Image (cartoon, rainbow, N blue to C red):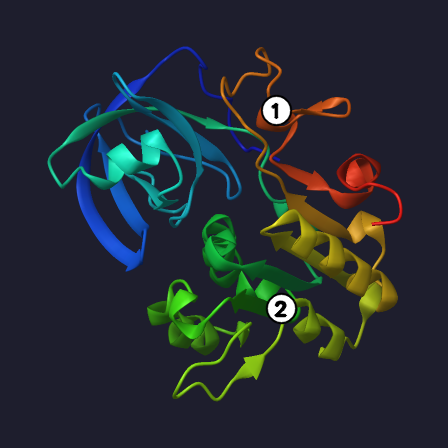
């Protein structure tokens, strides 16, 4: 649940790029600071997104990827995938762009307390989960066990590797896998859902599964969770479906009865399961 009023969908905030961190090939993290320096100007709920606007090019929906406690800046990890993100990749610190947001429904923060939590993700899907990781570790004593099951095609495709040691020190169990091993890789090989299949779950009835990534991955993660005794109402997914207006007016992101931009992007699995996948697949 979003803990503060929704943003005005028609208001664009001017921001300056304060820093750019190259993460992986074609993926970078941008620190954006508003020119309006009002206190708390960058509050957001983990799981929400902004619309990044480049005049003359267009805008794109990009999830937050920073610490929600940092209310003086926006952090976005962006993969080059179209005209907007390609143009953004050509910018440097000191350049300006526009931001609308934050928008959407975030991760179920009120549901976490006194539960075990499994995070399942792959590739850049870790970016929308990183704010949730920061939030959970900040409130670590109020939660049970926490696992991050993270996969990539190859070891050099794993995101935020510089942070894993600190996350583990604070009580997050990090398990990694890759589709194809490379020289020097001694970890798991295989799809990320295999890590879930092998995970020992002491209390499935009080375990939540939170997943973000390709829809096929989320489908199999949910199926694995069901086999382990985790019910659909304890599974949460994040969808990204052609979000263009961020206010539910254009209809491009409609999925069943929901508009992903305003009713999501985070949904409880039992609410969306019947709209996501064709029967028999």
Specify the quadrant of the image occupied by residue 83.
top left
Helix, strand or loop under label 1: loop
Rendering coords of residue 71 (x, y %): 33, 39
**Residue 46: assigned label:** none
What x and y, as percent, mark residue 258? 71, 24
Q: Residues within 10 Å of mark 2 (few under 14, many from 20)?
A: many
As drawn, is 62 to the left or to the right of 114?
A: left
Earlier-in-chain disc, 1 versus 2: 2
Question: What residue lies at 70% left-to-right and 61% top-to-bottom?
Answer: 114
> Would you name the residue on which mark 1 appears?
253
Q: Position of residue 155 (x, y in %)?
A: 43, 74
Asked if the residue under mark 2 is in contact with the one under mark 1, i.e. CB atoms within 8 Å, the reply is no
Give the residue drawn at x 60%, y 35%: 265
Looking at the image, residue 64 lies above or below residue 84 = below
Q: Is residue 112 visible?
A: no
Quadrant in which the N terminus is drawn:
top right
Eyeballing the image, is 51 above or below 202?
above
Up/down of 108 relative to 4, above or below: below
Residue 192 is labelled as 2
Distance from label 1 to label 2 (Cα)? 27 Å
Q: Nearer the viewer, residue 8 or 261?
A: 261
Name the secondary structure under disc 2. loop
């Amino acid at each position: 649940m979003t803990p503060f009023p929704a943003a005005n969908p028609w208001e664009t905030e001017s921001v300056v790029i304060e820093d750019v961190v190259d993460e992986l090939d074609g993926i970078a993290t941008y620190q954006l600071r508003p020119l309006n320096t009002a206190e708390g100007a960058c509050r957001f709920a983990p799981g929400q997104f902004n619309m990044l606007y480049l005049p003359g090019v267009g805008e794109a929906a990009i999830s937050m990827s920073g610490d929600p406690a940092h209310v003086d800046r926006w952090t976005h990890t962006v993969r080059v995938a179209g005209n907007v993100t390609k143009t953004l990749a050509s910018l440097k610190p000191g350049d300006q762009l526009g931001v609308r947001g934050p928008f959407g429904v975030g991760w179920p923060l009120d549901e976490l307390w006194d539960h075990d939590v499994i995070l399942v993700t792959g590739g850049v899907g870790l970016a929308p989960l990183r704010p949730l990781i920061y939030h959970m570790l900040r409130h670590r004593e109020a939660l049970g066990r926490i696992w991050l099951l993270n996969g990539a095609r190859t070891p050099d495709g794993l995101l935020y590797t510089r942070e894993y040691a600190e996350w583990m020190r604070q009580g997050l169990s990090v398990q990694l896998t890759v589709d194809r091993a490379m020289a020097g890789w001694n970890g798991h090989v295989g799809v990320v859902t295999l890590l879930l299949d092998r995970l020992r779950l002491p209390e499935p009835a009080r375990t939540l599964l939170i997943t973000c990534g390709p829809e096929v991955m989320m489908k199999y993660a949910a199926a694995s969770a069901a086999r382990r005794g985790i019910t659909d109402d304890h599974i949460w997914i994040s969808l990204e479906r052609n979000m263009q207006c961020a206010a539910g007016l254009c209809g491009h992101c409609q999925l069943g009865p929901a508009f992903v931009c305003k009713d999501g992007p985070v949904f409880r699995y039992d609410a969306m399961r019947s709209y996501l996948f064709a029967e028999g697949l």
